[in-house]
Amino acid sequence: MILANGILRPDEDLPQVLAGLEEEIVSTLSRPPLEPGVVTGACGALLDRLDRGELDELIARYSSPGLLAELAEYRSFLRPEALEARLARETGGLSGPRPFGRTEAYPLGVLLHIAAGNLDGLPAYTALEGLLTGNLNLVKLPSGGSGLSLALLKLLADTEPRLAPYLYVFPIPSRDRASLQTLARLADGIVTWGGDVAVTGLRAMAPAGCRLIEWGHRLSFAYLSGEPDPDDLAGLARHIAATDGLLCSSCQVIYLDTDRREALESFARSFLPLLEQAVRTARPDPGRAALGTLHGWEHRLELAADGAEDRVFPGRGCSLTVCGGRELELSPLYGNVLVKGLPRERLVRALAPQRGRLQTAGLLCPAEERAELTSLLARAGVNRITAPGSMSLPLPGEAHDGEYPLRRYLRAVDIADP
């Protein structure tokens, strides 16, 4: 289904919707800008309905049972006062008096969002950021999505009809280049959440003067130094099991501050039971549990075919692989994680090839070493440093991959005194 100006339309109407889209955009942008209070008020109304349980059936229809728990974690970030504080923090100083007169912040105009499919509700979230900054939003849904974002954005438009002209949602497949080029031609900014291939394709598609805003794929890892606390290790295991390695903030590699192979293997033996327990708890259904085993066996077959000397420590639905190299790379996913040695004096050098893709480091170390290692990780290019068990939890007031998104969705208009 297509969402166009508050109305759900069948996919067959795509040519008709696209044909009239430019005229509708011009009409909307000719009006006074969308006020942030309209958006925050609509979010507040939806949160009230969520608290009363009125949206439970809708969420259950389009997503996994765990989404309600995830929403509880993010609820405080969607409150009107939290959104207003975020606007002030991320856009503060952009408007104000200047020696020549004044500067005012205005929306870019039209944002085309190319959302990834690794997180339920991500298309709705990126559209919300566009609405907060007063932009008109064209959202391309990821292939194979659950339909949750479409349902949420329709609900948002129904709750506050003034938002309807600023929301257009399309289930366009990536292979439909002609339709995507039509949307790109109308955009003042393209927001992409995809990988390198998607970003390269969009760069070629973006018209001259269109701002390309990349929230591409990122890599995250845990860094352990000293004698780890058992509770912190259990938290890391729960994080690995809960995220399956599918998020940008998921731990792909567990680095130990050592070069000793025997220390890596000793860690793998002691950590594997914690990981097995976490996987059993996180995967009550056999299908998801089987994914961990399948990916683990596939990884072992690849190592055997390549003649690699890495040592795999297999567990039930998970595994740890002690590797000889230091490079940060994607793990085999679904509870199958890499373990590598990385002495701190070699950390910056080892992470340099992925410097532009680093996101979160889960740091586990003695208290007296935390300041030194935090500074070292930041100098290496890491943008988030947390406890290992909190790598994928939202941080109040945090940036996004080292930047403030809302500022990127605005432009500064300088107005000289007459």
Image (tube, rainbow, N blue to C red):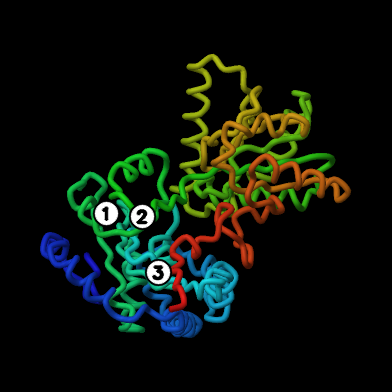
Front label number (2 vs 3): 3
Q: Nearer the viewer, mark 3 or mark 1?
A: 3
Q: Residues within 10 Å of mark 3 (few under 14, many from 20)?
A: many
| Disc on the earlier residue, 3 or 1 | 3
Secondary structure state at the residue bearing disc 3: strand
Q: Quadrant of the N terminus?
A: bottom left
Question: Vertically, is 348 above or below 274?
Answer: above
Q: CA distance from mark 2 to mark 1?
A: 7 Å
Query: Within 10 Å of the Cα at label 1, are there few (<14), some (14-19), or many (20+) other Cα atoms?
Result: many
Which residue corresponds to the image point at 37% horizontal and 69% vertical from the top-left? 135
Mark sitting on residue 190: 2
Amino acid tagged 3: Pro
- Badge 2 crowding class, 10 Å Cα cut-off, few under 14, some 14 to 19, many 20 or more, is many
Does 405 appear above or below 208?
Answer: below
Q: Camera-side residue: 75 or 383?
A: 383
For residue 2, say whether it is visible: yes
Q: Position of residue 396 (x, y in %)?
A: 63, 67
Asked whether disc 2 touches disc 1, contact meaning CB atoms under 8 Å apart, the reply is yes
- Give the labeled residue for mark 1: 184
Which quarter of the figure is the C terminus placed in?
A: bottom left
